Amino acid sequence: MADYETLLIERHDAVTLVRLNRPQALNALNTQVLADLIHAFAAYDADPEQRCLVLTGSEKAFAAGADIKQMQAKGFAEMYAENFFAGFEQVTRTRKPWIAAVAGFALGGGCELAMMADIMIVADNAKFGQPEIKIGVAPGMGGSQRLTRAVGKSKAMDMCLTGRMMDAVEAEKGNLCSKIVPLAELVPAALDMAKTIASMPPLAAIANKEMVNLAFESTLGTGILFERRLFNGLTATDDKAEGMTAFVEKRAANWAGR
Ligand code: CO8
Protein backbone atom coordinates (compact mmCIF):
# COMPACT_ATOMS: atom_id res chain seq x y z
CA MET A 1 0.00 0.00 0.00
CA ALA A 2 1.37 3.41 -0.95
CA ASP A 3 2.06 6.12 1.66
CA TYR A 4 0.52 9.50 1.04
CA GLU A 5 1.39 12.94 2.34
CA THR A 6 -2.24 13.99 2.75
CA LEU A 7 -4.20 10.74 3.06
CA LEU A 8 -4.40 7.82 5.48
CA ILE A 9 -5.40 4.50 3.97
CA GLU A 10 -6.80 1.44 5.75
CA ARG A 11 -7.92 -1.84 4.30
CA HIS A 12 -11.02 -3.46 5.78
CA ASP A 13 -11.17 -6.73 3.86
CA ALA A 14 -12.51 -5.76 0.43
CA VAL A 15 -13.15 -2.15 1.45
CA THR A 16 -10.59 0.67 1.18
CA LEU A 17 -10.99 3.45 3.73
CA VAL A 18 -9.38 6.74 2.70
CA ARG A 19 -9.11 9.56 5.23
CA LEU A 20 -8.24 13.09 4.18
CA ASN A 21 -5.46 14.10 6.54
CA ARG A 22 -4.56 17.81 6.61
CA PRO A 23 -5.94 18.62 10.06
CA GLN A 24 -4.04 21.91 10.28
CA ALA A 25 -6.06 23.24 7.32
CA LEU A 26 -9.38 21.46 7.99
CA ASN A 27 -8.53 19.13 5.10
CA ALA A 28 -8.49 21.96 2.57
CA LEU A 29 -7.86 20.56 -0.90
CA ASN A 30 -4.59 21.54 -2.56
CA THR A 31 -2.69 20.12 -5.51
CA GLN A 32 -0.98 17.54 -3.25
CA VAL A 33 -4.34 16.27 -1.98
CA LEU A 34 -5.54 16.07 -5.56
CA ALA A 35 -2.46 14.12 -6.68
CA ASP A 36 -2.83 11.76 -3.70
CA LEU A 37 -6.55 11.24 -4.32
CA ILE A 38 -6.00 10.52 -8.01
CA HIS A 39 -3.35 7.94 -7.13
CA ALA A 40 -5.37 6.32 -4.31
CA PHE A 41 -8.57 6.08 -6.36
CA ALA A 42 -6.71 4.67 -9.37
CA ALA A 43 -5.02 2.09 -7.13
CA TYR A 44 -8.41 1.12 -5.70
CA ASP A 45 -9.95 0.83 -9.17
CA ALA A 46 -7.09 -1.36 -10.37
CA ASP A 47 -7.09 -3.73 -7.39
CA PRO A 48 -9.39 -6.72 -8.03
CA GLU A 49 -9.44 -7.53 -4.29
CA GLN A 50 -11.00 -4.14 -3.44
CA ARG A 51 -14.72 -3.80 -4.12
CA CYS A 52 -15.81 -0.56 -2.44
CA LEU A 53 -14.13 2.59 -1.11
CA VAL A 54 -15.09 5.00 1.66
CA LEU A 55 -13.71 8.54 1.63
CA THR A 56 -13.93 10.45 4.88
CA GLY A 57 -12.31 13.36 6.69
CA SER A 58 -12.08 14.19 10.38
CA GLU A 59 -14.88 14.71 12.88
CA LYS A 60 -14.50 18.47 12.44
CA ALA A 61 -14.13 18.66 8.68
CA PHE A 62 -14.63 16.48 5.66
CA ALA A 63 -12.91 19.31 3.77
CA ALA A 64 -13.31 23.07 4.25
CA GLY A 65 -12.86 23.75 0.54
CA ALA A 66 -10.09 24.27 -1.92
CA ASP A 67 -6.98 25.67 -0.24
CA ILE A 68 -7.55 29.43 -0.33
CA LYS A 69 -3.91 30.08 0.61
CA GLN A 70 -2.75 28.15 -2.48
CA MET A 71 -5.27 29.85 -4.76
CA GLN A 72 -4.63 33.36 -3.44
CA ALA A 73 -1.54 33.87 -5.59
CA LYS A 74 -2.86 32.20 -8.72
CA GLY A 75 -4.18 34.31 -11.58
CA PHE A 76 -6.20 33.36 -14.63
CA ALA A 77 -3.26 32.55 -16.92
CA GLU A 78 -1.63 30.21 -14.43
CA MET A 79 -4.87 28.42 -13.56
CA TYR A 80 -5.86 28.11 -17.22
CA ALA A 81 -2.41 26.86 -18.23
CA GLU A 82 -2.27 24.16 -15.57
CA ASN A 83 -6.01 23.43 -15.85
CA PHE A 84 -6.14 23.88 -12.09
CA PHE A 85 -8.12 21.20 -10.26
CA ALA A 86 -9.49 19.70 -13.49
CA GLY A 87 -7.87 16.48 -12.25
CA PHE A 88 -10.82 15.96 -9.92
CA GLU A 89 -12.66 14.74 -13.01
CA GLN A 90 -10.42 11.66 -12.81
CA VAL A 91 -11.84 10.89 -9.37
CA THR A 92 -15.34 10.98 -10.87
CA ARG A 93 -14.24 8.45 -13.49
CA THR A 94 -13.59 5.76 -10.85
CA ARG A 95 -15.44 2.74 -12.19
CA LYS A 96 -16.02 0.93 -8.93
CA PRO A 97 -18.38 2.25 -6.25
CA TRP A 98 -17.35 4.70 -3.56
CA ILE A 99 -19.05 6.37 -0.63
CA ALA A 100 -18.38 9.78 0.94
CA ALA A 101 -18.78 9.69 4.72
CA VAL A 102 -19.10 13.33 5.73
CA ALA A 103 -18.69 14.81 9.21
CA GLY A 104 -18.25 18.48 10.01
CA PHE A 105 -17.56 21.04 7.32
CA ALA A 106 -17.98 20.14 3.67
CA LEU A 107 -17.60 23.55 2.10
CA GLY A 108 -16.79 24.72 -1.41
CA GLY A 109 -14.55 22.10 -2.99
CA GLY A 110 -15.23 19.85 0.03
CA CYS A 111 -18.95 19.85 -0.71
CA GLU A 112 -18.15 19.36 -4.39
CA LEU A 113 -15.86 16.40 -3.67
CA ALA A 114 -18.53 14.77 -1.50
CA MET A 115 -21.08 15.26 -4.28
CA MET A 116 -18.81 13.36 -6.68
CA ALA A 117 -19.36 10.21 -4.59
CA ASP A 118 -21.83 7.54 -5.63
CA ILE A 119 -23.44 7.64 -2.18
CA MET A 120 -23.13 10.19 0.60
CA ILE A 121 -23.69 9.29 4.26
CA VAL A 122 -23.48 12.15 6.73
CA ALA A 123 -22.94 12.60 10.45
CA ASP A 124 -25.41 14.68 12.41
CA ASN A 125 -22.82 17.48 12.69
CA ALA A 126 -22.27 17.78 8.91
CA LYS A 127 -22.44 21.25 7.39
CA PHE A 128 -22.52 21.84 3.66
CA GLY A 129 -21.99 25.05 1.76
CA GLN A 130 -20.82 26.69 -1.44
CA PRO A 131 -19.45 29.85 0.17
CA GLU A 132 -17.10 30.79 -2.68
CA ILE A 133 -19.10 33.93 -3.40
CA LYS A 134 -17.83 35.32 -0.09
CA ILE A 135 -14.26 35.27 -1.41
CA GLY A 136 -15.13 36.71 -4.80
CA VAL A 137 -15.49 33.53 -6.81
CA ALA A 138 -17.98 30.70 -7.39
CA PRO A 139 -18.01 26.89 -7.32
CA GLY A 140 -15.29 25.46 -9.56
CA MET A 141 -15.38 21.70 -9.03
CA GLY A 142 -18.89 21.01 -10.27
CA GLY A 143 -20.91 22.47 -7.39
CA SER A 144 -23.16 24.70 -9.48
CA GLN A 145 -24.15 21.64 -11.52
CA ARG A 146 -24.18 18.75 -9.02
CA LEU A 147 -25.78 20.74 -6.19
CA THR A 148 -28.49 21.99 -8.53
CA ARG A 149 -29.22 18.48 -9.80
CA ALA A 150 -29.37 17.19 -6.21
CA VAL A 151 -31.38 19.87 -4.39
CA GLY A 152 -33.04 21.83 -7.21
CA LYS A 153 -32.61 25.36 -8.49
CA SER A 154 -34.05 27.41 -5.66
CA LYS A 155 -32.03 25.82 -2.86
CA ALA A 156 -28.87 25.69 -4.99
CA MET A 157 -29.23 29.42 -5.77
CA ASP A 158 -29.89 30.10 -2.08
CA MET A 159 -26.70 28.22 -1.10
CA CYS A 160 -24.50 29.75 -3.82
CA LEU A 161 -25.77 33.33 -3.59
CA THR A 162 -25.92 33.67 0.20
CA GLY A 163 -22.97 31.36 0.95
CA ARG A 164 -24.88 29.98 3.95
CA MET A 165 -24.40 26.48 5.35
CA MET A 166 -26.92 23.65 5.22
CA ASP A 167 -27.07 21.24 8.16
CA ALA A 168 -27.40 17.45 7.96
CA VAL A 169 -31.21 17.45 8.34
CA GLU A 170 -31.64 19.95 5.51
CA ALA A 171 -29.16 18.00 3.39
CA GLU A 172 -31.12 14.79 3.86
CA LYS A 173 -34.46 16.48 3.17
CA GLY A 174 -32.91 17.95 0.03
CA ASN A 175 -31.70 14.52 -1.16
CA LEU A 176 -28.06 15.51 -0.98
CA CYS A 177 -27.30 12.40 1.07
CA SER A 178 -28.78 8.96 1.57
CA LYS A 179 -28.83 9.01 5.38
CA ILE A 180 -27.78 10.73 8.61
CA VAL A 181 -26.13 8.85 11.47
CA PRO A 182 -24.75 9.95 14.85
CA LEU A 183 -21.18 11.22 14.52
CA ALA A 184 -19.63 8.27 16.37
CA GLU A 185 -21.34 5.84 13.99
CA LEU A 186 -20.38 7.54 10.75
CA VAL A 187 -17.35 5.51 9.70
CA PRO A 188 -18.73 2.16 10.99
CA ALA A 189 -22.00 2.81 9.14
CA ALA A 190 -20.18 3.73 5.94
CA LEU A 191 -17.96 0.64 6.25
CA ASP A 192 -21.04 -1.54 6.81
CA MET A 193 -22.68 -0.19 3.68
CA ALA A 194 -19.41 -0.57 1.77
CA LYS A 195 -19.10 -4.18 2.92
CA THR A 196 -22.60 -4.90 1.64
CA ILE A 197 -21.68 -3.39 -1.73
CA ALA A 198 -18.37 -5.28 -1.70
CA SER A 199 -20.27 -8.54 -1.29
CA MET A 200 -22.14 -8.01 -4.57
CA PRO A 201 -20.98 -9.36 -7.94
CA PRO A 202 -18.38 -6.79 -9.03
CA LEU A 203 -19.33 -6.51 -12.71
CA ALA A 204 -22.96 -5.96 -11.79
CA ALA A 205 -21.86 -3.28 -9.31
CA ILE A 206 -20.03 -1.40 -12.07
CA ALA A 207 -23.01 -1.82 -14.41
CA ASN A 208 -25.47 -0.53 -11.81
CA LYS A 209 -23.24 2.49 -11.20
CA GLU A 210 -22.90 3.23 -14.93
CA MET A 211 -26.66 3.08 -15.40
CA VAL A 212 -27.50 5.43 -12.56
CA ASN A 213 -24.78 7.86 -13.61
CA LEU A 214 -26.10 8.00 -17.16
CA ALA A 215 -29.36 9.39 -15.76
CA PHE A 216 -27.43 12.64 -15.25
CA GLU A 217 -25.88 12.73 -18.68
CA SER A 218 -28.50 11.58 -21.19
CA THR A 219 -32.12 11.77 -22.25
CA LEU A 220 -34.58 9.34 -20.65
CA GLY A 221 -34.83 7.30 -23.85
CA THR A 222 -31.07 6.97 -24.24
CA GLY A 223 -30.67 6.07 -20.58
CA ILE A 224 -33.36 3.39 -20.75
CA LEU A 225 -31.89 1.90 -23.91
CA PHE A 226 -28.42 1.87 -22.28
CA GLU A 227 -29.92 0.19 -19.21
CA ARG A 228 -31.64 -2.52 -21.23
CA ARG A 229 -28.58 -3.25 -23.35
CA LEU A 230 -26.34 -3.42 -20.30
CA PHE A 231 -28.87 -5.71 -18.61
CA ASN A 232 -28.77 -7.92 -21.71
CA GLY A 233 -24.98 -7.83 -21.56
CA LEU A 234 -24.87 -8.93 -17.92
CA THR A 235 -26.64 -12.15 -18.91
CA ALA A 236 -23.37 -13.18 -20.57
CA THR A 237 -21.50 -13.15 -17.23
CA ASP A 238 -20.74 -16.19 -15.09
CA ASP A 239 -22.05 -14.22 -12.12
CA LYS A 240 -25.51 -13.99 -13.71
CA ALA A 241 -25.58 -17.77 -14.15
CA GLU A 242 -24.34 -18.28 -10.60
CA GLY A 243 -26.69 -15.67 -9.08
CA MET A 244 -29.82 -17.08 -10.67
CA THR A 245 -28.83 -20.71 -10.03
CA ALA A 246 -28.03 -19.92 -6.39
CA PHE A 247 -31.45 -18.29 -6.03
CA VAL A 248 -33.23 -21.33 -7.46
CA GLU A 249 -31.13 -23.72 -5.36
CA LYS A 250 -31.76 -21.59 -2.23
CA ARG A 251 -28.06 -21.14 -1.42
CA ALA A 252 -25.61 -18.26 -1.17
CA ALA A 253 -24.00 -17.24 -4.44
CA ASN A 254 -20.28 -17.54 -4.99
CA TRP A 255 -19.14 -14.70 -7.25
CA ALA A 256 -16.37 -15.25 -9.77
CA GLY A 257 -16.22 -11.63 -10.86
CA ARG A 258 -16.58 -12.42 -14.54
N1 CO8 B 1 -8.18 26.92 2.63
C1 CO8 B 1 -7.05 27.09 3.35
N2 CO8 B 1 -7.02 27.02 4.68
C2 CO8 B 1 -8.18 26.81 5.34
C3 CO8 B 1 -9.39 26.64 4.65
C4 CO8 B 1 -9.37 26.69 3.22
N3 CO8 B 1 -10.46 26.50 2.48
N4 CO8 B 1 -10.37 26.46 5.56
C5 CO8 B 1 -9.79 26.50 6.76
N5 CO8 B 1 -8.46 26.71 6.63
C6 CO8 B 1 -7.46 26.85 7.69
C7 CO8 B 1 -7.57 28.19 8.39
O1 CO8 B 1 -6.91 29.19 7.66
C8 CO8 B 1 -6.92 27.89 9.72
O2 CO8 B 1 -5.53 27.88 9.55
P1 CO8 B 1 -4.57 28.77 10.52
O3 CO8 B 1 -4.75 28.11 11.87
O4 CO8 B 1 -3.22 28.59 9.95
O5 CO8 B 1 -5.11 30.14 10.52
C9 CO8 B 1 -7.33 26.44 9.98
O6 CO8 B 1 -7.71 25.90 8.72
C10 CO8 B 1 -8.52 26.33 10.93
O7 CO8 B 1 -9.57 27.12 10.40
P2 CO8 B 1 -10.35 28.23 11.25
O8 CO8 B 1 -9.48 28.77 12.34
O9 CO8 B 1 -10.96 29.21 10.32
O10 CO8 B 1 -11.48 27.29 11.93
P3 CO8 B 1 -12.93 27.74 12.42
O11 CO8 B 1 -13.48 26.56 13.15
O12 CO8 B 1 -12.88 29.05 13.11
O13 CO8 B 1 -13.78 27.97 11.05
C11 CO8 B 1 -14.56 27.39 8.86
C12 CO8 B 1 -14.05 26.89 10.23
C13 CO8 B 1 -15.91 28.07 9.01
C14 CO8 B 1 -14.68 26.17 7.97
C15 CO8 B 1 -13.55 28.42 8.27
O14 CO8 B 1 -12.25 27.85 8.33
C16 CO8 B 1 -13.80 28.78 6.84
O15 CO8 B 1 -14.70 29.58 6.56
N6 CO8 B 1 -13.01 28.22 5.89
C17 CO8 B 1 -13.10 28.56 4.48
C18 CO8 B 1 -14.34 27.96 3.84
C19 CO8 B 1 -14.42 28.35 2.38
O16 CO8 B 1 -14.54 29.50 2.02
N7 CO8 B 1 -14.34 27.33 1.50
C20 CO8 B 1 -14.41 27.53 0.07
C21 CO8 B 1 -13.02 27.72 -0.50
S1 CO8 B 1 -13.04 28.11 -2.24
C22 CO8 B 1 -13.33 26.62 -3.00
O17 CO8 B 1 -13.49 25.60 -2.39
C23 CO8 B 1 -13.38 26.62 -4.52
C24 CO8 B 1 -13.41 25.21 -5.10
C25 CO8 B 1 -13.19 25.21 -6.58
C26 CO8 B 1 -11.73 25.33 -6.98
C27 CO8 B 1 -11.52 24.84 -8.41
C28 CO8 B 1 -10.98 25.91 -9.31
C29 CO8 B 1 -11.00 25.52 -10.80
Image (cartoon, grey):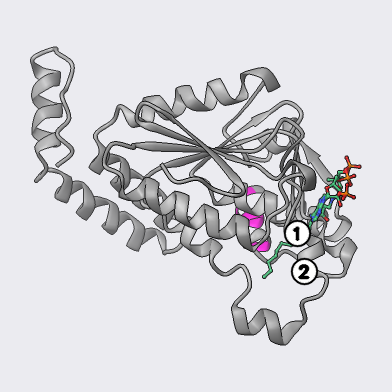
Task: Indicate if the residue with disc 1 has its beta carbon within 8 Å of ligand 1.
Answer: yes
Looking at the rendered image, the quarter that the N terminus falls into is top left
In the rendered structure, which amino acid carries the disc numbered 1?
A: Asp
Q: Quarter holding the C terminus?
A: top left
Residue 11's label in the rendered image is none
> In this orientation, which residue lies closer to the viewer: 99 or 241?
99
Q: Is mark 2 within 8 Å of ligand 1?
A: yes
Residue 226 vs 78, above or below: the answer is above
- On the rendered structure, is 47 left or right of 54? left
Residue 31: x %, y % from top left:
63, 63
Q: Please tell me how crowded label 2 is: few (under 14), some (14-19), or many (20+) other residues with Cα within 10 Å.
A: few
Vertical comparison of 102 with 129: above or below: above
- The label number, if any, that marks residue 67 in the structure image: 1
> Label 1 neighbourhood size at 10 Å, few (<14), some (14-19), many (20+)?
some
Asked if the residues shown at circle 2 and circle 1 are in contact, with their CB atoms under 8 angstroms apart, the answer is yes
- Residue 203 on image: x %, y %: 24, 43
According to the picture, the residue beneath numbered tag 2 turns out to be 71
- The residue segment tinted magenta is 144-150
Residue occupying image coordinates x 8% and y 24% = 245
- Residue visible at 76% across and 48% down in the picture: 64
Residue farthest to the bottom?
77
Q: Amino acid at mark 2?
A: Met
